[in-house]
Amino acid sequence: MNFHGSPLYARLRTRLLIGLIASLIISLFSAMASPLPSAAAPAGGYKIVGYWHNFDNGSGFIRLRDVSPDFDVINVSFAEPTSGGGGVIGFTPYNYTEADFKADVAYLQSKGKKVVISIGGANGQVQLATTAARDAFVSSVTGIIEKYGFDGLDVDFEGHSLYLNAGDSDFRHPTTPVIVNLIDALKSLNSHFGTDKFILTMAPETFFVQLGYSFYGGSCISCDSRAGAYLPVIYATRDILDWLQVQNYNSGPITGLDDQYHTMGSADFHVAMADMLLTGFPVNKNANLFFPPLRQEQVLLGLPANGNAGGGFTPVAEVHKALDALVKGQQLGSYKTRGSATGYPNFRGLMTWSINWDKFNQFEFSTKHRAYLNALNPPAPDTQPPTAPANLVTTGKTATSVSLSWNASTDNIGVAGYTVSYGSTQVSVTGTSAAIQGLKPNTSYTFTVTAKDAAGNVSAASNPVTVKTDESSGDNQAPTAPTQLSVASKSATSVTLSWAASTDNVGVTGYTVAYGSSQVNVTGTSAAIEGLKPNTSYTFSVTARDAAGNVSPAAVITVTTDTPSGAQPWAPGTAYKIGDEVTYAGKTYVCLQNHTSLQGWEPPNVAALWQLK
């Protein structure tokens, strides 16, 4: 995976004309080939897979639990042979105690991530030349997976790990021991752990896969015996292979299905390489040896995270251009997909070498590509309501008021507030208690409470509580209406009102500010109303009340909140549109998609919705 340079190609370029005689064969097979139907998985579910270094090569160390949440699958790289040719694989966590490493693997899994052990790499060549080596491989890999709780295995055999003996020309029926034994080993591991639980992936270089269209090691007298050597392994395990993430980097030019050379680092290269896997191709341009296409969800693009990670770094815009062609069918001017002109909506996603180099490069790969993929398949809106408030009880009452309390509700994104309902009246509060004012003496009221979250989901109602207010003291004279009601200040989300005090024969006990279905009770002659919507008109009424429960006539005023000027602080439960700017943790973000914000969707956490300005 961290292989740099490609001397393999230097020996091949002088022999490329050998295969050009058969160039017309592809036209026939492009017409004949039809991709396998996609599995029943719905469009979307796009993944980003990243390799985490179990060593430090200058990119810096990062703990597993600190890996960017934009990665869905973390490949721990690498487990390596303990000795040459024996098949025994070893793994010791770098810069970790075993207990801490296991804890971090479990932590990522608790967040819904998959953690896979990758075997091989440039320095870990694995050759299973004998059945004894095969069995030692299976036993040692099983032990590693079970010891650390990995979710599966990634095969990253490079260098001279795989090759084809002379005469081993049919990828469907390989005879070379290192190929046959690897296939048997992977099937044994899958059988041991169970297909539904065991993730099996592969990350070969283009030399070992797409080059097989032009040259196949077992049947090519003058070319490298490793050319296309992964093809029999992929073919034999295609039913248990979760995905193939060919390294589209550190590669020489590769001939695509259009019989043209394609050079790494461009959208053209990525589309041509992926299309070969999704369309299928005749191996060694032999009409009788057609490598069948993989399912859409079995193919990812493998990319370096930055220029330090490998040759052939592809700028973000070029990657998105390639994905537009592959997923949406927005064809490039240079290369047209053969397998589907309308795209592959179930295409699996992206892989990168590496997580460490991504962090080194300020997370450009993970954040920008996550935003693109999430835009293809945005996060589903939250529809889970809070639990119902429990144990609603009366904590006090007078002739004109009732005090209530209840147990807090729980919610997946957090409870934003509660609503106390009685008759046709609703009072909004943020805590788990409420003093309901302005009631009639000697009157029965039935109260219930519901909880709401930042997405607007409302819980079931609490247990009902029926309370009869105390008898009146005999006073039936209402206070005078508040006067001089005015706006003391306002912003895009708040209004502060003030008024002159009311008078009453026995004394005013408080005021109620009502707007829409909401009420705010205060004791003084001003109120700050928060949580309003920008550029919206509200009609506020203010009434006074006395100890006997008499309520004054209302003073009324209509106020329009301000239009936001510049970036406003991000807040949950707010409707944002494309181009809106917010501030969060001292940084400014620009909205990428229209949405209503939720707790947990803070701008740094949801790259699909917000971009750092």
Image (cartoon, grey):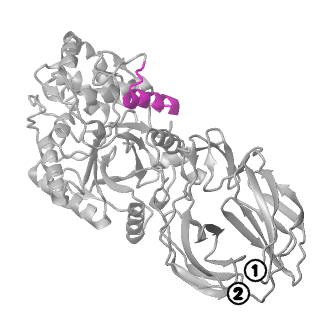
Where disc 1 sits, the SS reads loop
Q: Residue 2 location, x and y as percent?
A: 39, 42
- Number of labels in the image equals 2
The image quadrant where one finds the N terminus is top left
Magenta range:
313-332
**441 in relation to 424, above or below:** below
Which quadrant of the figure contains the C terminus?
Answer: top right
Return the residue nearer the eye: 396 or 241: 396
Residue labelled with disc 1: 549
- Say which amino acid is labelled 1: Gly
Q: Is residue 327 magenta?
A: yes
Q: Identify the residue at image location x=8%, y=37%.
A: 175
Callouts 2 and 1 close, C-beta under 8 Å: yes
Label 2, label 1: how far apart the Cα atoms are: 9 Å
Tell me where residue 186 appears, x and y as whole percent: 18, 50
Answer above or below: position of 606 versus 101. above
Residue 51 in the image: state x and y as whole percent: 40, 48
Q: Residue at x 54, y 68 (%)?
A: 451
The residue type indicated by label 2 comes to Thr
Q: Is residue 103 left or right of residue 293?
A: right
Q: Main secondary structure of the magenta part?
A: helix
Magenta run includes residue 385:
no
Res 477 → quadrant: bottom right
Q: Is residue 88 visible?
A: yes
Residue under pointer 2: 398
Judge whether 338 appears above or below 203 on screen: above
Q: Is residue 552 above or below residue 492?
A: below
